[in-house]
Image: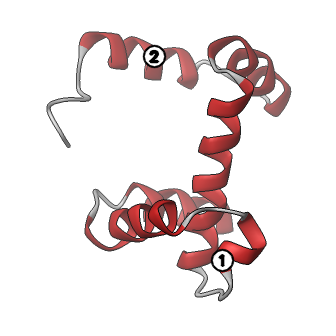
Amino acid sequence: MSKKIKTEAAKRLFQAVLTLETEEECFTFFEDLCTVNELESLAQRFEVASMLYDKHTEVADKTGASTATISRVNRSLNYGSDGYDMVFKRMKK
C-alpha cells in the first residue's frame, strides 16, 4: 500500500466507513462526505473496473468514462494492490 494514503486521517475515514451497516447509511454518509461530482466519479471508476474485470467491451460507450480514466482503472486492475479483485470476488458470493 502506498505510504501516501496510509495516514491517520485516512485510517479514521476507513474506520468510519466500516461502521456503516446498510446501503442507506452509505448514501447518507457519502452524500455528506462527497460532492455529487466526486461520488459520480467514484461510482464511474467502480463501474469501469467492474466491466473490465468481467471482460466487457465498449466500456467508454457504456460508462461515459474518458480513455484516461479507463486506462487508469485498467492499470490498477493489472498492477494495483488487488483491491478491486478482492471486492469483486466478495460481491459474487
| 2 or 1: tag closer to the N-terminus | 2
* Quadrant in which the N terminus appears: top left
Instruction: Judge by depth and name the residue closer to the eye, 31 or 24.
Output: 31
As shown in the figure, which amino acid type bears the numbered disc 2? Answer: Leu
Q: Residue at x 64, y 75 (%)?
A: 51
Coloration mode? secondary structure
Q: Is residue 50 visible?
A: yes
- CA–CA distance between discs 2 and 1? 30 Å
Q: Is residue 33 above or below residue 45?
A: above
Relative to 61, residue 11 above or below: above
Q: Residue furthest left?
A: 3
Regarding residue 93, the answer to whether it shows in the image is: no
Instruction: Identify residue type, mark 1.
Output: Val
Q: Quadrant of the C terminus?
A: bottom right
SS of the residue under disc 1: helix
Q: Left or right: where does residue 89 sit relative to residue 14?
A: right
Residue 37 x/y as whole percent: 69, 32
Q: Splitting the image into 4 quarters, where does residue 60 fall?
A: bottom right
Which numbered dot is residue 59?
1
Left or right: where 85 falls relative to 1: right
65 or 31: which is nearer to us?
A: 65
Q: Residue furthest right?
A: 24
List x then y, in percent, for residue 35.
Answer: 68, 21
Query: Which residue is painted at 39% across and 62% down in the image?
Result: 72
- Front position in the image: 13 or 39: 39
Q: Which residue is mark 2?
A: 13
Quadrant housing residue 24: top right
Q: Position of residue 7 (x, y in %)?
A: 23, 18
Q: Tell me residue 30's x, y (percent).
A: 69, 22
The residue located at (66%, 61%) in the rendering is: 47
